[in-house]
Image: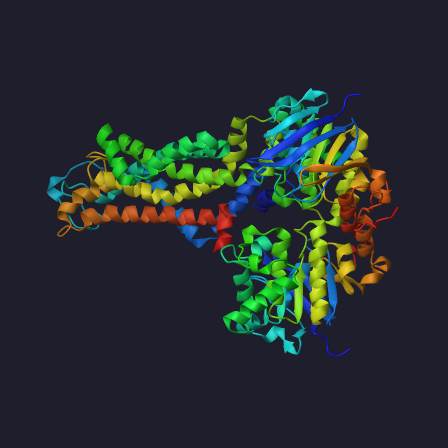
Amino acid sequence: MSAVREWLLDDSPSSRLQASFGRAWRMFSALLRNPLAVAGMLIILALIAMAAFAPWIAPYSATGQDLANRLVPPSAQHWMGTDELGRDIFSRVVYGARITLMIVVMVAVIAAPVGLVIGAVSGYFGGWADRILMGVTDIFLSMPKLILALAFVAALGPGIENAIIAIAITSWPVYARIARAETLTFRDAEFIAAVRLQGASAMRIILRHVLPLCASSTIVRVTLDMAGIILTAAGLGFLGLGAQPPLPEWGAMISRGRNFILDQWWVATMPGFAIILVSLGFCFLGDGLRDVLDPKQRENR
Amino acid sequence: MSAAIQLQDLDISYGPTKVVHGVSLAIAEGESFALVGESGSGKSTILRAISGLAPDWTGAISVQGKPRGHAPDREFAKTCQMVFQDPYGSLHPRKTVDDCLSEPLVVHGIGERDARVKAALAAVGLDQRFRFRYPHQLSGGQRQRVAIARALMLEPRILLLDEPTSALDVSVQAEILNLLKRLRRDQGLTYLLVTHNLPVVSFLCDRLAVMRHGRIVEIAPVEALRRGTLHDAYSRELYAASGGTVRIG
Amino acid sequence: MSAPLLSVKNLRVTFPTAKGPVDVVRGVSFSLGRERLGIVGESGSGKSMTGRAILKLIRPPGRIAADEMVFDGLDLTRQSERQMRAIRGARISMIMQDPKFSLNPVMTVGEQIAEALQPHRPMPRRQLRDRVLGMLEAVRINEPERVEKLYPHEISGGMGQRVMIAMMLIPEPDLLIADEPTSALDVSVQAQVLDIIEELVTGKGMGLILISHDLNLVARYCDRILVMNGGQIVEQCAARELDKAEHPYTRGLLAAMPRMDEDREELPVLDRSAWAAT
């Protein structure tokens, strides 16, 4: 163990691999020193574990109905009670983790790279490219996120895939703005001038030299946005435009529980707790990541 | 004899303002030439125009007999490279020394990268254990050595040096100046040095041009600087302000 | 000579790091009369930290400790933050390296100079304005009525630094600490700015601590020089005897500087092992 640690923290690494592992380790141990970030990480790890091992964790099927046991309050058999069709809410919440995780990952995978590339290209070239790309970005930014997502889903038809696409379409502009702002700060830096003078192409400079520097602030922002993405997905589900029944999507579950909120509070409340907890987890992790990845922010505090 | 760098009636603008007016110069192969002047005199702008970083110019620039275009290009990169002033700003903060030195080789598809990087580190007097460090793990002097090694990776004939030691401590400056002098002697390089520091010119250069408000006011051999016999009134003023004793007559 | 203006004994500045506390200033002692003292050293020598420590301007988690730090009878180590605020500016002033960062971009030059005086000596508006104009004149600014109304981005670096000097000297402090006051300026402007500082300091009988990396500059404008390295004072000497300095570090620094009439093939490089052991 200590040999590995020493290898990681070596001031004079002897290979590329060791250097990048060392850097990653230093960041990770800085993250471990932040209690809130650790709490966030634990919550997200729990979410991932729940999604991965759902069939083993959930005591019942997520869709199996048992009309004899409708709207049972939380008990030893049904930890979170059952809903109007007698389905075990705890099992549905556990399976719902899969949907939530998928939405979050898909949105991040689609929206973040698109935003990064558009922002970096816009910032690096400036001029007309910048005006056109940022014009488009501004049009998207000027519309409320949920309304825009609603419009897209309405046009594409309800369903989880379309919800993901709609959320991704509404979230990339923020990343484009961040990437552009970051790019502008070092576009004229000497280290970029130096690679230009070595004859590197604009494409290579953007991909290999500009994007790695935008990445950390984008990662922070994506993590912080995760909560918003989950809430938007839940909102779409709540309005019946996201995941369709019988999929155990948390937002849709709250929507169904709305009818019983006064008498059978647990139907809507349990998935609500799950949403809040996971959103908080991402916020904590995002704040921690910002402290580690973005030293500028730390000094401002 | 073809000049390493030839400038003819060079005017350079930044946006609407013209910062360099009608500069003509010829720097011989193997010569070490200095452009001196105060901030705003246009001396750095000339370097940027030659390298392609300041594209808005008129007149003619030719490097080793070939006319220069207005942007950096791949072929030019192999004949002429630049070393920047600020060792903290000229290295990519997320790339190791190895990445930084390999990059020009990758761009130009040159092989034997491992051996070349090792040789470059040795040439600038850096121990091999610095190879996989990040810039924040290096001192200012070590960073400037890396920047010089990077400029030499493509084996250029000409180095443009933009205040290469003015951000460094005196003792580190001496090391870098010695290194630059040795590299020039060993590899027969041509230097075009921009600086405000006259003693550095005296140590490293053969000839100098004094610039003021975007114009060259005097071109003199370095002996004139050493003996304090610069002719132009402004040159003498600069000389006195830099701590030189002006000799009358 | 009577009691010194400032006396510092065994000053230490410590910063905690991941690898334990690091002393950036390690037991510095000196005293200062109404004279010009130069502190020279390379980056990381602790010279700037020494200057800031006198004003207790070390930000936490940095810590200052000293056996004695007495300014004109006042024990600075015992002053509260509130009391220090009354001392800073009014009795001890500090000029920083780059006027660009020290001047408020949304206030005119005149307002800022007035602002520097007002809290310490409240006075009627007219009188205040006269003082400001007089001060601008003293730092050799032509047309002070015009310059007074300008914003910092409308003036040059050299003029910005002169405005800073005006700001720092208008409350008539007893001690001026100038930390690299001219290293952001051109050589010809440097001399001008330093001449103004020197004239005002000697004219008003103030003490001056000039902190710089430039040996020649300090030798030219100071009476006495402290050479710092690694957080310690390695040599003290009179400015005009700098070329007779004995410590290998000072000698190394002097030799490493290229000269105007340079004829050496190679510059001697500091051999840090020569005194690192001591």
| Quarter of the image that includes the N terminus of chain C | bottom right
Query: Measured from the top left, where is residue B206 in percent x and y?
Result: 81, 35
Q: Is C154 placed left or right of B98 in the picture?
A: left
Of A49 and C99, nearer the camera is: C99
Q: Is residue B217 above or below residue B108?
A: below
Residue at x 55% of width, y 51% of height: C153
Residue located farthest toward the right when viewing the structure as drawn: B249
Displayed quadrant of residue C172 = bottom right
Query: Measured from the top left, where is residue B57 in percent x and y?
Result: 61, 29
Query: Measured from the top left, where is residue A161 in percent x and y?
Result: 28, 30
Residue A105 in view, yes or no: no
Q: Is residue A265 above or below residue C124?
A: above
Residue located farthest toward the left when viewing the structure as drawn: A68
Of B57 and A24, nearer the camera is: B57
Residue C154 in view, yes or no: yes
Total numbered labels: 0
Query: Measured from the top left, where is residue A236 in percent x and y?
Result: 24, 38
Of C139 and A46, nearer the camera is: C139
| Quarter of the image that includes the C terminus of chain C | bottom right
Residue at x 33% of width, y 35% of height: A139
Residue at x 70% of width, y 73% of height: C7
Q: Is A134 placed left or right of A275 in the picture?
A: right
Colouring rule applied to residues: rainbow
Of A171 and A48, nearer the camera is: A171
